[in-house]
Image (cartoon, rainbow, N blue to C red):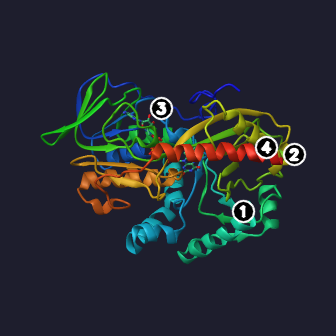
Amino acid sequence: MAKVSENDSNLWHKTCFEQVSAPPLDLDTAVDLVIVGGGFTGLSAALHAAEAGASVCLLEAQEIGFGGSGRNVGLANAGLWLPPDDIRAHLGQQAGDRLIALLAGAPAYVYDLIARYDIACEPVRNGTLHCAHSAAGLADLRKRHAQLAATGAPVALLSAGETAKRTGSDAFHGALFDPRAGTIQPLGYVRGVARAAQAAGARIHGNSSVVELSHQNGTWSARTQGGTVRARALIQATNAYHQGLNTQVPAYVPVHYFQYATAPLPDKLRATILPGGEGCWDTALVMSSFRMDAAGRMIIGAMGDLGHAASGIHTAWVRRKLAQLFPVLADQPLQMGWHGRIAMTSDHIPKITRPGPNALAAHGYSGRGIGPGTLFGKGMAEALISGDEGKLPLAAIGGHAERMTGLQQAYFETGATLMHLIKARIGY
Ligand SMILES: Cc1cc2nc3c(=O)[nH]c(=O)nc-3n(C[C@H](O)[C@H](O)[C@H](O)COP(=O)(O)OP(=O)(O)OC[C@H]3O[C@@H](n4cnc5c(N)ncnc54)[C@H](O)[C@@H]3O)c2cc1C
């Protein structure tokens, strides 16, 4: 099985209508705020800072959306991966409640931005379905439902029959429906936010890897091959794709996730599979996801890395999984396959850290970066411009460390590979 290289076979690159011109930095310049990293976090920070009147320069090592922002499933969820009680247990009641309330509004904020800037990113806000793959999965969804409902979230627990009607698959024991959420074309969204940031006055440079960050006499210097940006304030938004800088390296456990897309399905099939257009994922430990795109392609994904020698196991498994969920799709060829790296923290809570004076960094959305990345970028820009850290979604910490990240990564990847291999042996 040939290895899948970075973005060669990424559906989002083939179907993205948004374009953004981001030439490399080729001079020395000075601005109020320099941002490193051109994903949801960095670009949202650039947009909101520029709209607030700050002069902004964003430096991206590759092209806009190269990292997780251009590779993900496109589920614009409300909240974090963790259910509300776990968030409060980690952050305390007050900070937990504040974050839960903020992120409950994250999809609304994202879809408002999309509408305001007319971003071409296939926005569908018909909710998401967290599908129970087993009786134990359904018990977990019941707990999540109770906790979310207690926060006022308009979620509903669906029966197996209703879930079958909505998904077109009878593989599930039930599902948790969240009408606040939806799906987007993630690369279109991140490029659209970049376009909006440019229109607000932000300067955005691609192919401009920051090779050195330093702070002297109240000024940050971000040096690239083509020039240096000096600024009073710095935001680092490099997350799981941090590269080229051996300082301020975000600490996280890398977890790989891959996706495959079919060809556009005929109308007859589209009428029976996800006719309502919800985005879905399941309760399995080695999770999988499925959704449709605007052209009617089925996009199915699961934990695993397509970039190693045993990646054929993942590909073979996803074929069987598709056939198991939707027998009518058993013969549909998988046309495109790509993968990406998720920055997971051990407690599944994102971190805002302080790389130095007048500087903030965010990472570790643990697979929930569309809404949180947008709001964390906004919050960091507002906090640095106003000098009021009360504008941050959660308190900044000096730094964050993770233990044995290599071992934990091996645990996730080996676990996903073994699980997909074992399932092959038992027939799906
Ligand atoms: C396969 C996959 C599926 C996912 N599914 C979902 C989902 O359905 N819903 C959801 O909400 N979230 C999902 N996520 C998580 C989400 O995509 C991420 O949390 C989000 O994209 C993080 O955005 P970011 O801007 O913080 O980082 P990124 O988008 O990773 O951007 C970081 C950028 O920094 C740049 N960079 C790094 N080092 C330097 C340097 N030295 N100089 C300049 N630039 C540099 C990188 O090139 C990169 O472009 C998924 C992630 C993956 C990988």
The residue where tag 1 is placed is: 132
The amino acid type found where label 3 is placed reads Val
Mark 3 near mark 2, Cβ–Cβ under 8 Å?
no
First reached walking from the N terminus: tag 3 or tag 1: 3
For residue 147, the mark is none
Q: Residue tagged by mark 2?
A: 328
Q: Which residue appears farthest toward the bottom when viewing the image? A: 150
Q: Which amino acid is tagged 4?
A: Ala
Q: Nearer the viewer, mark 3 or mark 2?
A: 2
Q: Which residue is mark 3?
A: 20
Instruction: Single out the mark in the foreground, 3 or 1.
Output: 1
Labels 4 & 2 near each other (Cβ < 8 A): no
Q: Secondary structure at mark 2?
A: helix
C-alpha separation, residue under disc 4 versus residue under disc 1: 21 Å
Q: CA distance from mark 1 to mark 2?
A: 21 Å
Which residue is rendered at x = 31% and y = 26% of the image? 224
Q: Which percent across, then down, holds residue 415?
A: 63, 47
